[in-house]
Image: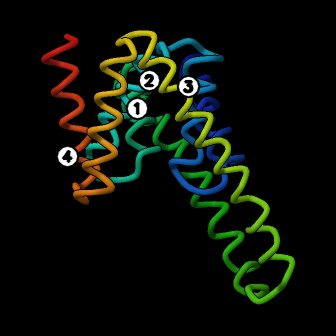
Amino acid sequence: MIYWELFLAFFIPNIIGYGGGPAIIPLIEAEVVGRYGWMSSQAFAETLALGNALPSPIATKMAGYVGYEVAGIGGAAVAVMATVVPSLILMVAALGLLYRHRDSPRVKRMSQWVRPVIAMMMAWLTLSFLLEGVSTSGWLHTAIIGVVAALALLRFKVHPAFVVVAALVYGGVLLG
């Protein structure tokens, strides 16, 4: 039964999610944290931060980690398969259709309507992480991490992986 739940927890977000890994993270969080309760919001946020610091697509890393935590190696395999296979099937099926109609105004409009939805989902995820950070670490530490991260990314063009690692070190040293 746990394998079926793992499969559904990652299959559904990957079937209905549009826009790649970052766009489906809120959907995965809703399943993993909200529906099944396999992780707390804080643990999910930490897993996401660690996953963002590592190479490869975020959705498969999240699936592998959560699957392993819930049901061992078999769980990791099921979760990763549930993440990859739907995208592969849909991509192959839709590729021919989209390629034939790539210049269609309808296809272009569809893409334009989906972007704001993805932006709002990402904004909601960011807000929930901010509120979780404030409730567990306080305003001061959250503000310090946020301001330093923004400066490093925007002003000094530091790679995001280094910013995540620095935030993890800060949290481990001062908050751990």
What residue is rendered at 50% in x and 14% in y?
38
Which is more toward the observer, 18 or 111? Answer: 111
Q: Is residue 73 visible?
A: yes
Specify the quadrant that holds the N terminus.
Answer: top right
The answer to whether any part of residue 70 appears in the image is no
* Contact, mark 1 vs mark 2 (Cβ under 8 Å): no
In the rendered image of this protein, does residue 82 appear above or below residue 157?
above
Amino acid under disc 3:
Ser
Q: Residue at 42% across / 26% down in the picture?
A: 45
How far is the residue under mark 2 from the one under mark 4? 20 Å
Q: CA distance from mark 1 to mark 4?
A: 27 Å
> How busy is the neighbourhood of tag 3: few (under 14 within 10 Å), some, or many (20 plus)?
some
Q: Nearer the viewer, residue 45 or 137?
A: 137
Helix, strand or loop status at disc 3: helix
Q: Residues within 10 Å of mark 2 (few under 14, many from 20)?
A: some
Q: Which mark is residue 128?
A: 3
Q: Which residue is mark 4?
A: 162
- Give the amino acid at mark 4: Phe
